Amino acid sequence: MLIEQNRETITGRILSRHLIQGQSGLTLRYYIATRNGSVVAEVRGQEYVCFCPSKDLAALSKLLQHNGYRTQPLQLKSFQHLPMSAIYCRSTKDYRHLLRVAKDLGVSLHEADIKPQQRFLTERFIALDIECEGYFEHQISQAIFVITRARKAAIDVNLKAISLDFECSGHGELYSVALYGKSYRKVILVGKETDVCQVTKNNQQSFGKQEYIEFVADEAALITCLIAWFEAYDPDVIIGWAVVTFDLALLYRRAKKLGIDLTIGRQNQSLGWKVEDKYRPETLNLPGRVVLDGIDWLKAAFYHFERYSLEFVARALLGEGKAIEQVDNRLEEIETMFIQDKPALAHYNLTDSRLVWDIFESTKLFDFAIARAQLTGLELGRVGASVEAFNRLYLPHLHRSGFIAPAEPVSTGIESPGGYVMDSIPGFYKDILVFDFKSLYPSIIQTFLIDPKGLISTQGEDNLVPGFLGAQFSRNTPILPSLIAELSASREQAKQAKDLPLSQAIKIIMNSLYGVLGSRGCVFHDAKLASSITMRGHEIMLTTKAWIEALGYKVIYGDTDSTFVWLGEKHDAQDVQRFGHELAQQITEKWREKLNCQMSLTSHLVLEYETHFEQFVMPTLRGSSLGSKKRYVGAYTKADSQLEIVFKGMEQVRTDWSPLARKVQYELYERLFTHQPVEQYLQDIIESLWQGKLDQELVFQKRLKRNVEHYKSQSIPHVKAALKLFGMNGDSKVIKRGALVEYMITINGAEPTQHLQSAIDYSYYLDKQLLPIAEPVFAVLGKEITTITSNQMSLL
């Protein structure tokens, strides 16, 4: 029996969004975290909706006369200024049929890919936080809040999070699961309390029985216990390392094999996948809970690491790693601990879980993920999806301006150019100042009123803003520049409040806007839009260069939004910092005056002084006198009087160079900048190389980006080494996507370090690794590197 209670208002944070097909139509279901716990909320009697030029409805008349559909003429227009009609449908089956029929008939349906549960929020400007009016409907097993009205809200809800990590056998059988959270730790472990070993292999006291360990009889009991734990602890957020693609996928497969319904979602809902056997974050369906993968979110927040293993990232960020000795052979150690020392396995498992938690805390990834969802309207936990984020931001404003989004992008065959990259002037310099335009592309969009709607709503206007490729933009209420203005203001507030996660989230979103408009995957894509951004950027960079050089300084390089200025030999370096800020302000003011006088535009272009390199090397292209691009080395003195060396695009920052090459490169430039001799150092390195003293530094490490059979060429060094290793040990894991391949170059090519059968090719390391990185340094010093190599060869 259903009982309608008094109307209430709830506010909270949307955790997950779902579409439920019922006999009377569609129900939108939202799991909302409130300050008083989670709530299941529903909007009933909803429909699919898409849009169609009114003139094309006749072609669909045979289909639309059925009861499942209804149409309504609108005041909105297409980008071609055609009258539009809405088509409504209550059934998923009927809607899919509509899409197929329209495609067969060549009828364009606009905004047809927007899901009802998303559109309901988007049209109301609701991103993450929501205020709902309605009433609770109490059913036998649960209470559902029926929404009658919803609006965006501003609320801070503390979400309950847990870090989850599984350990398993080589065949995937679950051994244990660790659960770590704020003031919480637990390990569910297959075994018996009598399995506690008293002495470890190192003759040290075992970890013994710990209060956080709960022993269970077998794998099935572990899964059943975990299901009960989810119901009792009831987390809002699950975090982990490859937590979707490994942990949850493994748990799902093992539960399925054992015939266990994996009801770890809210309201005893089962974990599932929208696409069978595709275990990806975008296909995961876990009602009422959010899953955040550490690897994906570090990348989304623009953290960069040489490798993304938990061991590597934890050591880089936290200064500690896994609780195991042989990390690369951890599977063997895990199986040994499971048999001989289960408390040690529990400690190892819990440590992994804690490391993930500490990484999220130290990088503020929780806050970043929330800020991103609040800004874009994307589901909390959704990474990527820049095009969808753009649509969520843009569409409600577009509709209120009287337009429907295009059905497909404009395709003229003309592509916009990339960012401006100047031909560099190679050499060794002192006193190089680096200037950057603050958020150049967003600033161009805001200044020059670049806007999809503004491009097509110019009728009747005389004073248009010129773009490129024939583009002209309306000055009348542009949408995108206004959105950027709001984002910019929010970012300044975040910076003043020292809210770094929010500031970073806004920066990433703003910088993604050009990429979206330049993508053929976006329905708003038009070469006129993208070119009006990048080509304007070229113009700005070239004009800025001319203005600076007119003041008597030399611009030696420019890249997208950065300008490298040489102060010259006679400049007084004592006031460099003040001069840098003054020059940046001067150029900013010149842009303000120019755009106001010539185009009646308000300039949002701001040049900022970034760095003073006391010493700077712009190398030449190999085998050429021409300057390189996107490659340089600079040095400056830090506040603690220590020299800081910055490598850009050099071998030092690339993983396809050996550790030896990178070490030698750093040492050579440090010697160059500190006026130490380089010849004897390089001679000693080459001698040690030939004597075999540096073999441990010759190992390359590279991960397989796909299974080896999917590589077009299997002569690629790390692929070749992986195949050789597989041929020797028969372990298929070494040729699968994600496998880390360690190899060296021998006289017979690349060979895995685990089974090195041929002599190391020292000539390769000398000619292909050391000499190419040493040559630019010797060229700066006016020295010939061939004299050193000749001397070395005479000693062999």
Image (cartoon, rainbow, N blue to C red):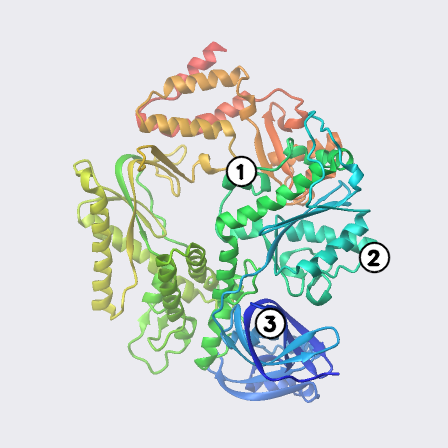
Q: Nearer the viewer, residue 559 or 121?
A: 121
**Secondary element type, mark 1:** helix
Q: What residue type is labelled 2?
A: Gly
Residue 201 quadrant:
top right
Q: Which amino acid does label 3 sit on?
A: Asp
Mark 3 — residue? 113
Q: In the drawing, does residue 365 fall left or right of residue 348? A: left
Mark 2 to mark 3 CA distance (whole Å): 35 Å
Q: Which of 119 and 752 is in front in this view?
A: 119
Mark 1 — residue? 315
Residue 104 quadrant:
bottom right
In the image, which is nearer the foreground, mark 3 or mark 1?
A: 1
Label whose residue precedes the other's in the sequence (1 or 2): 2
Q: Nearer the viewer, residue 461 or 372?
A: 372
| Vertical comparison of 19 with 652: above or below | below
Q: Which residue is drawn at 67% across and 35% down?
A: 722
Q: Which residue is drawn at 67% across and 62% down?
A: 286
Q: Residue at x 44, y 16 (%)?
A: 684
Label whose residue precedes the other's in the sequence (3 or 1): 3
Q: Which residue is drawn at 76% across and 53% down?
A: 223
Residue 728, how many percent across, how many down?
74, 29
**Secondary element type, mark 2:** loop
Q: Residues within 10 Å of mark 1 (few under 14, many from 20)?
A: few
| The N terminus: image quadrant | bottom right
Mark 2 — residue? 259
Q: In the drawing, does residue 153 fall left or right of residue 432? A: right
Q: Which amino acid does label 1 sit on?
A: Arg
